[in-house]
Image: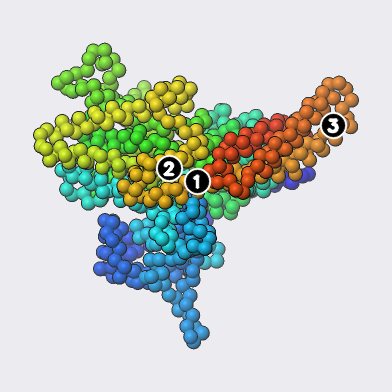
């Protein structure tokens, strides 16, 4: 029995895990929630009253941090963390690698008398230092310019991360260079929130709202992922190195029967999910939902809404703990956007809204959206932003992995459009056409009208079942950007990506629209006259501008591809097509105006994106060559030798002849890919390398995969070295 067979035999004899890591009959999950978080109530109990009030002003109102309180906060944090077993602290940040980074420093401080004290100062809380040249900077930092700083973000509370032999106090931070440029995802995102807050408040003021002091975005990020047994994964170099299968013939059964979606969760997987949720619960991550996804072996978890900064930090924790806990259960968690060909890939749906500090959701249409002018203005601001800056939104979700997923019949296409639902679409259309109660629609237009302000309960027809309340609009899972009742769902973000990039762009472009709206309405207030008519006139102008981006139909259809082209909507099919957008004059002006990115930071990020794209494909190509030369070719040659000894009829020899032909194609494919990889010169710029990888290396990889996948269907199963899709997706 080969290694693959032994792994399958071992999995088949698995004993399901019995008993959880905690008995919720003895320990209420409500009481355990956020136990390891230095949240507001902990701060209230442990900080002096004036220190607590000052810190809360910074957290809730965005006031400047008073550095004089840092020592008190640091002491309280240290004492609280040590009570939970912490021996170290870490400034936790999000560099441009797309993941998180941490350096652990001990509280231990030796004294002259060979004793030790536990120390953690305010200066250590506020600022840390890391080697900035060792993280991607896009030329902002050179190897000899190493200094970078981590800066405490008080708006995201510190927390405890347990490990088998202790615990660490983790402090969310920003990461900037010695010269002040942002080298992370968090810093520009926080700047974009400030820009949106500033201009949203201006809009609220012209509508007469003087009570709201701060506007925040809220976010809930749904996370899709795959789980496979790590004994099988260990036999797949592609999964271990690049996180996706570079080879693999489609199994006889995939997701065709739609029987996996929302199906019964396998016992082993449910044990894993329960432990993930238990860990996240202690960290204050509000996970609400878990279920099977569409593809076999695919799952999803989703939280409730939080303020955006906290939600994004929590999302990075979710990905980290999914990977860590999976290993404890003998599983490998795959967060790649397309781990398997021929079945659905994974994304993360970003449910985004705008709200005030006094509890008003500015994207809540109310019972009569047609007469809710403030809602219509904010909704129109988002639509205008998406239409004007759709290329930037597309860029924000660009990656080598997401290129495989976007546009397939599983994920939104690369063409950015908005689904509003029939109610809002009709409201906007009526505004443009001038329909009012005093001036009704023309008779030929009435046939497509729907009642806007009435409930439409669903009557099932069974006396014991009450009528079900119907939402104001249906959902459109094919739309990349859909209004879903009181929020917009940006569905196109990739499962492995840090959502901060997409949210930073979204916040900034909406801030620009709100700035435009506030300026126009402030002028209207100054001039005087009918303010309601000024609002209506502005709405009509914006609707006429963004109407081309509205589409409520099937985004997967070929008809939409043709229609979107007719409307003039951009279709940036891959990451390399997107890259120039970041440094276009309009992009530089936008991000500079709202204080989110400098020109140097934009050019640096463009360089990083190009480098990561080319490097990713280069690693995949090298892995594919290694596997095909050392695993696939020896296996099929051995099978050929076995056939040569027994193939003695014309029919049997025909099988051998076909095998010989495919082996020749395999060798040719290996040689072609090898030549493509060899052509990647060290003197190429990152952009040149990215273009070459897209145009040449990917094509050679695809051609080699086709022949290997065909050979998998011909070769003796006992000789095939790689676990098959059937085994990876269905063995638990």
**In this view of the protein, which residue sits in the foreground, 636 or 130?**
130
**In this view of the protein, which residue sits in the foreground, 171 or 278?**
171
CB atoms at circles 1 and 2 under 8 Å apart?
Answer: yes
Furthest residue in direction front, as rendered: 683
Q: Which residue is mark 1?
A: 609
Q: Evaluate whether residue 271 shows in this view.
A: no
Mark 3: secondary structure: helix
Give the image quarter of residue 379: top left
Q: Evaluate whether residue 438 shows in this view.
A: yes
User: Across the whole image, how many numbered discs are drawn on residues?
Assistant: 3
Q: Which residue is mark 3?
A: 643
Up/down of 426 relative to 195, above or below: above
For label 1, the crowd category at 10 Å Cα-Cα, with few meaning under 14, some 14 to 19 and many 20 or more, is many
Q: Which mark is residue 582?
A: 2
Residue 239: give x, y in percent of width and height: 63, 45
For label 2, the crowd category at 10 Å Cα-Cα, with few meaning under 14, some 14 to 19 and many 20 or more, is many
């Amino acid at each position: 029995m080969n290694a693959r067979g032994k792994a399958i035999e071992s999995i088949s004899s698995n004993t399901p895990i019995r008993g959880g890591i905690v008995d919720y009959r003895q320990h209420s999950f409500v009481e355990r929630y956020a136990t390891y978080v230095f949240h507001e109530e902990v701060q209230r109990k442990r900080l002096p009253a004036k220190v607590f009030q000052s810190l809360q002003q910074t957290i809730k109102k965005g006031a400047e941090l008073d550095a004089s309180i840092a020592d008190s906060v640091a002491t309280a944090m240290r004492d609280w963390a040590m009570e939970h077993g912490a021996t170290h602290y870490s400034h936790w940040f999000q560099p441009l690698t797309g993941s998180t980074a941490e350096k652990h420093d001990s509280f231990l401080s030796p004294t002259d008398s060979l004793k030790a004290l536990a120390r953690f100062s305010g200066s250590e809380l506020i600022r840390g230092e890391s080697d900035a040249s060792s993280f991607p900077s896009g030329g902002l930092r050179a190897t000899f310019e190493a200094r970078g700083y981590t800066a405490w973000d008080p708006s995201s509370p510190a927390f405890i991360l347990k490990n088998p032999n202790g615990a660490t106090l983790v402090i969310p931070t920003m990461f900037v260079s010695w010269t002040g440029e942002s080298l992370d995802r968090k810093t520009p995102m926080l700047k974009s929130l400030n820009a949106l807050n500033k201009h949203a408040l201006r809009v609220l003021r012209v509508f007469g709202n003087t009570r709201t002091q701060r506007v925040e975005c809220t976010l809930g990020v749904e996370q899709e992922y795959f789980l496979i047994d790590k004994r099988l994964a260990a036999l797949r170099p592609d999964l271990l190195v690049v996180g996706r299968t570079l080879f693999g013939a489609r199994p006889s059964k995939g997701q065709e029967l739609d029987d996996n979606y929302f199906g019964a969760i396998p016992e082993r997987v449910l044990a894993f999910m329960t432990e993930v949720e238990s860990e996240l619960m202690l960290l204050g991550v509000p996970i609400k939902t878990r279920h099977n996804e569409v593809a076999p072996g695919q799952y999803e978890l989703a939280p409730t809404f939080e303020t955006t900064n906290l939600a994004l930090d929590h999302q990075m924790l979710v990905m980290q703990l999914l990977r860590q806990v999976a290993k404890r259960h003998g599983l490998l968690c795959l967060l790649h956007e397309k781990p398997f060909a021929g079945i659905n890939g994974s994304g993360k749906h970003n449910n985004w809204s705008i709200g005030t500090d006094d509890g008003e959701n500015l994207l809540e249409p109310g019972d009569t959206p047609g007469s809710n002018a403030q809602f219509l203005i904010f909704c129109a601001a988002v639509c205008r932003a998406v239409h004007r800056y759709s290329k930037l939104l597309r860029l924000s979700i660009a990656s080598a992995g997401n290129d495989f997923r976007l546009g397939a019949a599983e994920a939104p296409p690369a063409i950015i459009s908005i689904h509003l639902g029939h109610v809002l679409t009709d409201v906007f259309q009526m505004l443009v056409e001038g329909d009012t109660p005093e001036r009704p629609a023309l008779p030929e237009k009435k046939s497509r009208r729907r009642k806007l302000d009435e409930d439409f309960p669903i009557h099932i027809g069974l006396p014991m079942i009450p009528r079900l309340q119907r939402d104001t609009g249906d959902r459109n899972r094919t739309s990349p950007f859909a209004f879903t009742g009181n929020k917009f769902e940006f569905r196109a973000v990739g499962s492995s990506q840090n959502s901060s990039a997409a949210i930073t762009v979204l916040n900034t472009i909406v801030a620009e629209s709100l700035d435009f709206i506030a300026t126009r309405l402030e002028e209207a207030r100054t001039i005087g006259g009918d303010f309601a008519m000024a609002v209506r006139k502005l709405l009509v102008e914006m609707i006429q501008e963004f109407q081309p981006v509205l589409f409520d139909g099937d985004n997967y259809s070929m008809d939409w591809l043709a229609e979107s082209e007719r409307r003039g909507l951009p279709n940036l099919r891959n990451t390399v097509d997107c890259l120039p957008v970041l440094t276009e004059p309009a992009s530089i002006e936008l991000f500079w105006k709202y204080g989110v990115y400098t020109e140097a930071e934009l050019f640096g990020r463009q360089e990083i994106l190009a480098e990561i794209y080319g490097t990713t494909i280069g690693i995949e190509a090298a892995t594919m060559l290694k596997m095909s030369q050392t695993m696939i070719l020896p296996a099929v040659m051995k099978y050929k030798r076995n056939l040569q000894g027994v193939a003695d009829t014309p029919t049997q020899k025909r099988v051998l002849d076909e095998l010989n032909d495919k082996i020749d194609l395999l060798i040719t494919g290996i040689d072609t890919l090898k030549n493509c990889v060899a052509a990647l010169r060290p003197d190429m710029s990152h952009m040149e390398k990215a273009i070459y990888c897209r145009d040449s290396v990917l094509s050679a990889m695809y051609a080699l995969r086709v022949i290997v996948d065909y050979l998998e269907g011909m070769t003796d199963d006992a000789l095939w070295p790689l676990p098959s899709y059937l085994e990876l997706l269905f063995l638990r």
